[in-house]
Amino acid sequence: MGILNVTPDSFSDGGRFLDPDAAVRHAERLLAEGADIVDLGAESTRPGAADVSPDEELERLAPVLRALRRGAPHARLSVDTRRAAVARAALDLGADMVNDVSGLADPAMAGVAAAAGAPLVLMHMRGTPATMQHLTAYEDVAGEVCAALAEAARSARNAGIAGDRILLDPGLGFAKTAEGNEILLRQLRSFLSLGHPLLVGASRKSFVGLRSGVKDPAARGAGSLAAALEAARAGAAVLRVHDVAATREALLVQGAIRGAGKDA
Ligand code: HH2
């Protein structure tokens, strides 16, 4: 899953793809590099990001979705939003799936995805992007995140979404310390027992910068690859990344070493 942030303030690529033409060009590049899914987000979730109204979120998404639907009809497009109304409008414009980083904070979200027959990503977080950095204390981070995801998945299934269309994501960097993120990656395999495909997003995040000593998020490619490979080894089905070509190359080599070949 290649990341396309149509925002002025995302932590690693804010402002680069706010212009719809630049966004479309970048999406085409992600697809050419081998992304199976492009994840379009119009609201930064970094701590302290500016509030975006639903109208503004949709104003940023709509031209990019329309152009991509025309220019890349077979591309799988995901919309990264916490709002059911934005998700519904994006699905009407041709998005194929929804990525909800709030894990169903909007009670209408599961119904919207169910009605459209769209896959839904449920990510774990606590609080909101503005408060999450103060909510990083857990007794057992993997156990608590796993329990919360199990509950969210149950709600989504009850709304009528098939189990294999619900993807679960531990939410690295969202109300987690660096150590918490590392424990989640280390114990990711245990999340497979939830019975849903797993999605992991470690790309360029601050824990990668902290451990590698790289301050500039855009320069955290090598550290991000290390985290992506660990997630893949633990059984993640989808990796949400900025650097698609490098991730794909690394996965192909890892797959060959592990004997999984091109299907890795
Ligand atoms: N991380 C970010 C945004 N959306 N969605 C899922 N499912 N999992 C993630 O880990 C995840 C996500 C944050 O990264 P980014 O989009 O690069 O930054 P920003 O939120 O500043 O736009």
Image (spheres, rainbow, N blue to C red):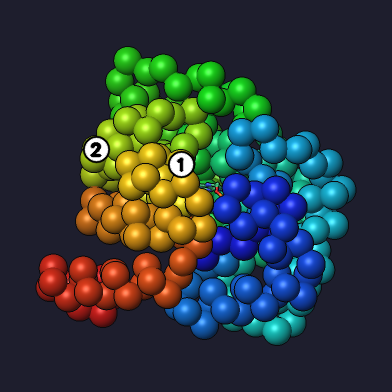
- First in sequence: mark 1 vs mark 2: 2
Which of 21 and 157 lies nearest the eye of the viewer?
A: 21
Label 2 beta carbon within 8 A of ligand 1: no
| 1 vs 2, front mark | 1
Q: What residue is disc 2 on?
A: 187
* Residue 5 image-quadrant placement: bottom right
Q: Is residue 12 left or right of residue 264?
A: right
- Where the C terminus falls, by quadrant? bottom left
How packed mark 2 is, by other alpha carbons closer than 10 Å (few <14, some 14-19, many 20 or more), is some
State whether residue 224 appears in this view: yes
Q: Secondary structure at mark 1?
A: helix
Relative image position of residue 190 (x, y in whole percent): 24, 39
Q: What residue is disc 1 on?
A: 206
Relative image position of residue 201 (x, y in whole percent): 44, 50
Which of 200 and 73 lies nearest the eye of the viewer?
A: 200
Which residue lies at the image location 51% right of the left edge and 58% below the top edge?
218
Relative to residue 259, is residue 161 depicted above or below? Answer: above
State whether residue 167 appears in this view: no
Relative image position of residue 119 (x, y in whole percent): 54, 56
Which residue lies at the image location 40% right of the left edge and 28% below the top edge?
177
Which residue lies at the image location 80% right of the left edge and 58% below the top edge?
60
Q: Is residue 98 left or right of residue 230?
A: right
